[in-house]
Image (spheres, rainbow, N blue to C red):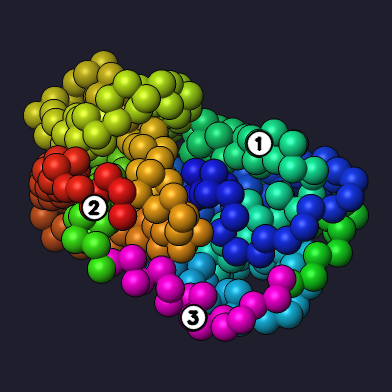
Amino acid sequence: MKTAVKNARLNDTSTPQPSASWSGVFAMSVCAFALIASEFLPVSLLTPIAADLQITEGMAGQGIAISGAFAVFTSLFISVLAGTLNRKTLLLLLTAAMGVSGAIVALAPDYFIYMLGRALIGVVVGGFWSMSAATAIRLVPPRDVPRALAIVNGGNALATVVAAPLGAWLGTVIGWRGAFLCLVPVSLIALGWQWKALPSMQAAARTSGMSHVFKAFTLFKHPGVIVGMLASSLLFMGQFSLFTYVRPFLETVTGIKGTGISLILLVIGATGFIGTVLIGRVLQRAFFHTLIIIPALMAVTALALIAFGQWTAVVVALLALWGLTGTSAPVGWWAWIARVFPKDAEAGGGLFVAVVQMSIALGSTAGGVLFDISGYRSTFTASACLLLAAAFLAFLTSRSRAGHSA
């Protein structure tokens, strides 16, 4: 979840430490980089994974779906399950589990073990993003919190740009298993750094763990909120039903192989980074117009990829537009959460994390099934339909009073 750190206090807020621990902040940024790379690495390695494990590309893509499903459960219940466990210890356990997940996937002899490793990374994703922002807040004085959050988010931004193309390149040089094994030393570096730099962080006192979990669902009593959440859900479903299978599309339709895949993924990541930087100003000028236009542009892009899939230059341009719009889209919906729930941002943000991860799981699952049954055309068409529906629901949200402030 690239933008989750902006939701400042998701879980374990507490009084900041007396002195700043910037080393701990940078350690968490490294961990965020490794986590984003781990979560979405299968996207850049889908074809070799499928060939080696003797499965279809759609089945390999379910590795994204299962991680999203386990992330949903963990993000909702980790505070209850962890209880009074020291939050430094919990973060160290999650970071260690990230390295174990990479090793399991890299050494997987069959599809079941591969999915087991992907389920484990889902647990880490849900746990880490439920705690990362609140942990960063506890490491520095209040005046330095924005800077600390920006540093942690820098790990996300860097992974967005380099993880996918680097993974594809490593796949051609040392194989997909070697690419996943490269995540293990990065996880160990983050583990050792956090062990040395993070202070002891006792769990904050809670009145009722389960009431904290289910409080978020009471927000659905506002009709405008339901429409807005559904709009964001369809956006992520449409996005990942297509993006998860972009590599086999490039290989089989456009005819791009090897380093060409890495370069195109780098273009997507770079334009996505640019879009994330620019969207803040765009949202200030036209908030709901932006939320409507982004999925509409993505839908047009999906249909254009079907029509011009054999034209390399056109495909590169279209995927650049996809990265520009799709990567920046979550920023707009996080801003909507803050606007709609100014007094319940914690509960609204937690619910949004669950919605996003579940949508990623459903989208990649549906896209994989369609890809295996009838090919990329049906997958990309379904993505376009979902994105057009998201644009329409975003329009309805803009017309709803509850969609502006609940």
Q: Which residue is mark 1?
A: 146
Residue 330: image quadrant is: top left
Q: Which residue is mark 2?
A: 402
Which residue is pictured at 58% across the width and 74% down the height?
78
User: Which residues make up the magenta segment?
Assistant: 204-220
Type of amino acid at the residue the image marks with label 1: Pro
Q: Percent from the top left, x then y, of residue 194?
A: 81, 54
Which residue is pictured at 61% across the width and 81% down the height?
207
Q: Secondary structure at mark 2?
A: helix
Residue 146 makes an appearance in the image? yes
Q: Which of pointers 2 and 1 lies earlier in the amino acid sequence?
A: 1
Q: Secondary structure at mark 1?
A: helix
**What's the distance in space between the residues labelled 2 and 1, CA to CA?**
29 Å
- The label on residue 96 is none
- Number of numbered callouts drawn: 3
Q: Secondary structure at mark 3?
A: helix
Q: Percent from the top left, x then y, of residue 243?
A: 31, 43
**What's the distance in space between the residues labelled 1 and 3, CA to CA?**
29 Å
Identify whether 325 is placed above or below 12. above
Q: Residues within 10 Å of mark 2 (few under 14, many from 20)?
A: some
Which residue is pictured at 67% across the width and 81% down the height?
83
Q: Which of pointers 1 and 3 lies earlier in the amino acid sequence?
A: 1
Type of amino acid at the residue the image marks with label 2: Ala
Type of amino acid at the residue the image marks with label 3: Ser
Q: Any magenta on residue 35?
A: no
Residue 315: image quadrant is: top left
Q: Which residue is mark 3?
A: 211
| Mark 1–mark 3 CB contact (< 8 Å) | no
Front tag of 3 and 2:
2
